[in-house]
Image (cartoon, helix red, strand yellow):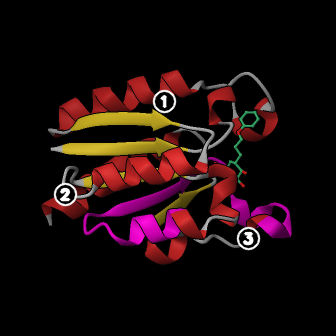
Amino acid sequence: MVIDVIHGPNLNMLGRREPDIYGTTTLADIDRELMKLGTSLGADVETFQSNSEGEIVGRIQEAYGRVSGVIINPAAYTHTSVAIRDALSMLSCPIVEIHLSNIHKREPFRHHSYVSGVADGIIAGFGARGYRMALEAVMEIIRE
Ligand code: CA2
């Protein structure tokens, strides 16, 4: 069983800039932790980060029929990308949208997500630990 974890633009900078908003954990730390948790839950966690909208759309298309669940932090594309939403809407597996910060506590332009309408659930505001919550949630939905 494969769970795909997709990280959007600038998340490769995690832990290196703006620790007050996004924390000090790096993306490599998050990926390592998810792979470990995945093994204990019986899933192969694959991770992908891109700063390019087209590459993220391509990755979602490749997930079609191949993966059992998707966890996605579309980062800034959350608030702009109909293309990512449309790609996600083609999947039939569970989708969890995740944000490190509580986007509803921040600037008004972050309050709208194009992705939420096609996600099974949303986790926001719990920092890096939200990824663990997302993986546990996705595995529980799959097993229901
Ligand atoms: O809270 C989140 O996870 C966000 O998806 C992060 C995005 C932001 O545009 C969304 O509104 C909320 C930004 C990711 C940028 O990540 C950085 C990490 C370290 C330093 C600078 C940016």
Q: CA distance from mark 2 to mark 3?
A: 31 Å
Residue position marked by numbered label 1 in the rendering: 30
Q: In this rendering, is residue 57 above or below 111? A: above
Residue position marked by numbered label 3 in the rendering: 111
- Residue at x-position 34% and y-position 70%: 90
Residue count near mark 2 (Cα–Cα under 10 Å), binned few <14, some 14–19, many ≥20: few
Q: Amino acid at mark 3?
A: His
- Residue at x-position 69% and y-position 27%: 13
Q: In this rendering, is residue 104 above or below 117? A: above
- Residue at x-position 73% and y-position 21%: 16
Question: Element type at marker 1?
Answer: helix
Image coordinates of residue 88 in percent, x first then y, are: 41, 65
Looking at the image, tell me whether mark 1 or mark 2 is earlier in sequence order.
1
Whether the residues at callouts 2 and 3 have beta carbons within 8 Å, the answer is no
Looking at the image, tell me whether mark 2 or mark 3 is earlier in sequence order.
2
**Highlighted range, magenta:** 84-109
Residue count near mark 1 (Cα–Cα under 10 Å), binned few <14, some 14–19, many ≥20: some
Q: Amino acid at mark 2?
A: Gly
> Is 105 within the magenta?
yes
> Is 20 within the magenta?
no
Image coordinates of residue 65 in percent, x first then y, are: 19, 57
Q: In this rendering, is residue 26 above or below 68? A: above
Q: Which mark is residue 65?
A: 2
